[in-house]
Image (tube, rainbow, N blue to C red):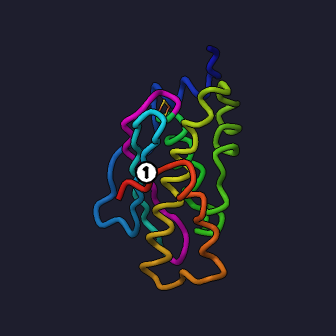
Amino acid sequence: MEYSDKVMDHFMHPRNVGEIENADATGMVGNPKCGDIMKVYLKIENDIIVDAKFKTFGCGSAIATSSMATELIKGKSIDEALALTNKAVAEALDGLPPIKMHCSLLAEQAVKSALKEYFEKTGRMNDENRHLFDMLDDDAHDAH
Ligand code: FES
């Protein structure tokens, strides 16, 4: 199996590892295929993600994608963060081996799970945007 230099770099030197005290939103998901778990913490000001941290108990690809996903959403609006797909994260890492693509779902779902909490907390969840979180019911089990 071949890993890109970027995957190796983010696996060996993951960015944004840790917790945010008094985070505005947190999301935790587990990958039912392997049992790996990711928790993400977001600091949100004026609907901009000003900080993101994560803790991932998982494989190297899960750690690399967690690292890249948190890098990609920092400084972005919550809408932009919601649009982040696991494919975009994998592409930012110059790709993942096909059998490791499911690992990148963990990062997308953890971010969405945190944003779902934020939407609910701030009273902006409604019938129009609820579908944006549908994928949380698909491949991962919400580990709350
Ligand atoms: Fe579990 Fe990669 S093998 S997330």
Residue 119 on image: x %, y %: 50, 76
Magenta run includes residue 50: yes
Q: Is residue 44 above or below residue 112?
A: below
The percent position of residue 91, horizontal first and vertical second, equals 71, 38
Which image quadrant is residue 96 in? top right
Q: Measuring 63% from the left and 76% from the top, which residue is drawn there? A: 129
Q: Residue at x 55, y 38 (%)?
A: 65
Q: Which x, y percent locates residue 67?
A: 50, 41
Q: Which residues are magenta?
A: 46-61
Say above or below: 59 vs 40. Answer: above
Relative to 135, say whether 100 is above or below.
Answer: above
Vertical arrangement, residue 37 with respect to residue 141, above or below: above
The residue where tag 1 is placed is: 29
Whole-percent x, y for residue 1 in the image: 62, 14
In the image, 48: left or right of 97? left
Q: Is residue 117 magenta?
A: no
